[in-house]
Structure formats: structure tokens, C-alpha cells
Image (spheres, grey):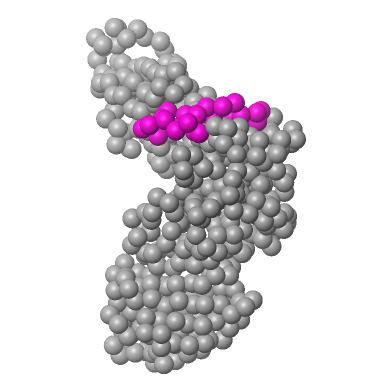
Amino acid sequence: MAVMISAPAIAEDTVTLHPADGTEFEINGRRYGGALTIAASESGLALTETTSVDAYLAGIKEVPFGWPDEALAAQVVAARTYLANTMRNGRSERGREHGFDICASSACQVYAGTSYLDEQHGDRWLAAVEHTARQILTFDGGPILAVYSSSAGSRTMAVQDVWGGAALPYLQPVDSPEQGVSPYASWRVEIPSRAFVEILAADGHPVGGDLIALDHRIPPEGEGRATLVVSTTRGTATVLGPAVKGAMNRQGADLYPALLPAARSDGKRLPQALPSYRYRVSYTPEHAIPEFVLAHLPYDDAVQFGTVVFDGEGWGHNLGMSQYGALAMALEGEDYAEILSHYYGGLTPEDAGDHLPDEVVIGLGWDLGSVTFSASGAFTVVDDTDAAGPRSGGTWSAIVGNDGVVLFPAIGYPTAPDPRTGLPAPV
């Protein structure tokens, strides 16, 4: 059977699928136990899930579930705090457009509904969620920006040195004891100088020609972002240190897939072309020619094929809690409160109070051409007019028709199309 929204195809046209007890929806191999809302707009369909805060946290997988209990608990509190801070700051532009509080990708926190809990040790992650119920970190009357990343190497960084702006006292550098624990504690990336210049140019930086010199200027901790002065046969440009990471990761693998990401010492490739913001970069020309000589040489004679070397630590933005650092501290017997206090300026977990709502709306996708889902049992469909009703399980699809969201069984629907839409005829 099918349900069609009778109103025009605008953003307000929605269908919401409320699962009966025990029913789960499966989409692209992931299962969801909350209410799903499918909304139509001119750009396609948006898919969101409404569920409880604890169900949302249970659906996150940011670290392996086999890690020690205290590392898992620290991750839960950081993730819950990140959610609380996100909701306190209000919805993003995309969130306002499509009606969600937080996205499900790595741009927010990686979320996959109930799917992860069936994995090995999923029960231990769920126990960590329950053990730390309603606990968050607060500063100055509200939840902190509890960012975290995979690995910091030997030391985290100050937020003002990475993202610029004002200093936050709970996002300042601390030692991270992960040497021998993290596979990203240290790394090296070497690329030809010509490749380095081409990568920066492809990302929009005003560089070109052949590299003459690099001057990597790194201020003392807490005093701002590093810069890289790039001198080539066509001039000199200054690039922010963090922007170099972005350029390498956006352009490097596409331009030089054989070189980037580079190999680690164990033969595996690094996760990104430039994994973190904590690095030092140097340039070694194949033939060292004094700069004052180069200035007087014809262009073709000035060509050099040197090497640019990045020596770095960690994987991620290097701010807040290092997940491998949390693992290392847990292995040394530290509890989750001590781990969080270490990485977030001495703050310790406390009850969230009114900083957490009962429910959260998660953006699972938008600008979609269609949505196909399977229901393990019965569910109720509610549309804009509340005219729809209960449906059995099975596989269903949703598409945008002239009259809004069209919902129909993915198998066995009528073959004769609706003459108005060219789509399977709704009944």
C-alpha cells in the first residue's frame, strides 16, 4: 500500500514512521529504533530520526568497544557533553533547513542507530552509557565544547593555535602519554617539492613555479597559529599552518595517489595525507643553490627537484581528549573522571541538569533522491493531515512526487504509474 501527501511538495510535507514496540527500521545496512521522519523539498528528501539522548549515545562508535571500561566511560561523557553543547548553540544552517539537532557523520559524531550494539563488546559500550548517565562537563554555566580526536602524539594543542580566535581554558595543551600505544604517535610524510607546490596551488593558494625555500614559523604554545612562508621561482606566499593540512588532505591523494597517504613504518598507509596539525615541515633541495644566485638565474636553470618533509604527531585536530591518550591512561589505572580532568583543564563530570533535553533529532541524510527502508515489524505512519495509519513490516520506499512524499511498498506495488507523476500509483 502507499501513502501520498496531498499538499504541495515543499519542505513542510513530511511523513513520520513510528515503530511499534520491538520494531526497527533498516536503511543501507544500519538499523534505527526511533521514529523516522521523511521530509520533501525541492532538493529531494531529508531523513531524520527522533530518539532519546541515551539511545543516541548508544548508537555512537568513536572508539573500539573492547577498550578498557574507563576509556569507554570517558568517551561517553565527552560525546554527551559535545551533544549538549551542540544543542545549546542551536541548530546549524543545515539543521534548521532539514529539522535536525546533530548530524550522524564524522562532521558531528559518528552514529549508526542500534547497529553497533550487536558487535563484539557492544554490551560494554551500553554499560558505559548507563554508568555515566546524564554526566557532562561544564564551564561558566554551560556544557563545554568537548572536542576530541584519535591521537595527539606527545601533546595536545591550544584551540587558538589550531582554529584561531579566543582561548578556551579547557582546550589548552597537556601531555598525552600515548607513545607505544597509538599507531599515530609519530609519522613522516615526504613528497617532491614540485608536488607540494602543485597541491597548494590546486587548493587555491597563490603559489607556482618551483620551490626555493620554506620558512615554518611556529609561535610559542598558546600564541596563535603557525605560518608557512613558501618561496618559489614565481614569488612568495604565506599560508597558515592549519591550511596546509587542509590542502594536503583535500588535494594530495587526488593529485598524487601513489604518494599520498604515505606509508607508515609498519607498511600500512596513514589515514590521511597529513594526519594532524602538529607537525614541522622542512625542505631539502637536491642541489643547494644560494637564494641570491637563484634570483639571477633564468627560470629553467633555477628548477630544483627537492623534497618537502613533514614530521608530525597524532591523527585529528589535536584538541581536547586524545582517544589513544585516554586508552593509555586507562591502561595505567586512571579512572574516567581523571582522564577527562587531564584533557579538559581540570573539569570533572557533573549532572547535566537542564542542559540535556529528553530527545534529540539526528540528521541521517538530506538531498536524497529516494529512501528505501525495511521494517522488522509494525509501524504507524503519520502525515501532515494525520490521515495515514498502521502499516505492516517489509520493505518500503519513499520518493518525491508532485504532491509531496510518496510512500509505497518496494516490492509488489502496482505497475501502472500515476499519470500525474509517472510514479507508482498511491492507494
Classify residue 421 by image quadrant: bottom left
Compared to 89, does 185 lie above or below?
above
Q: Which residues are magenta?
A: 153-179
Of 162 and 238, the residue lying toward us: 162
Of 185 and 381, the residue lying toward us: 381
The quadrant in which the C terminus is found is bottom left
**Residue shown at 42% from the left, 78% from the top:** 15
Total count of labels? 0
> Any magenta on residue 168?
yes
- Residue 255 in view: no
- Percent across and percent down for residue 119 are 69, 59
**Residue shown at 65% from the left, 51% from the top:** 132
- Residue 158 in view: yes
Of 155 and 270, the residue lying toward us: 155
Of 201 and 306, the residue lying toward us: 201
**Residue shown at 30% from the left, 77% from the top:** 9
> Any magenta on residue 28?
no
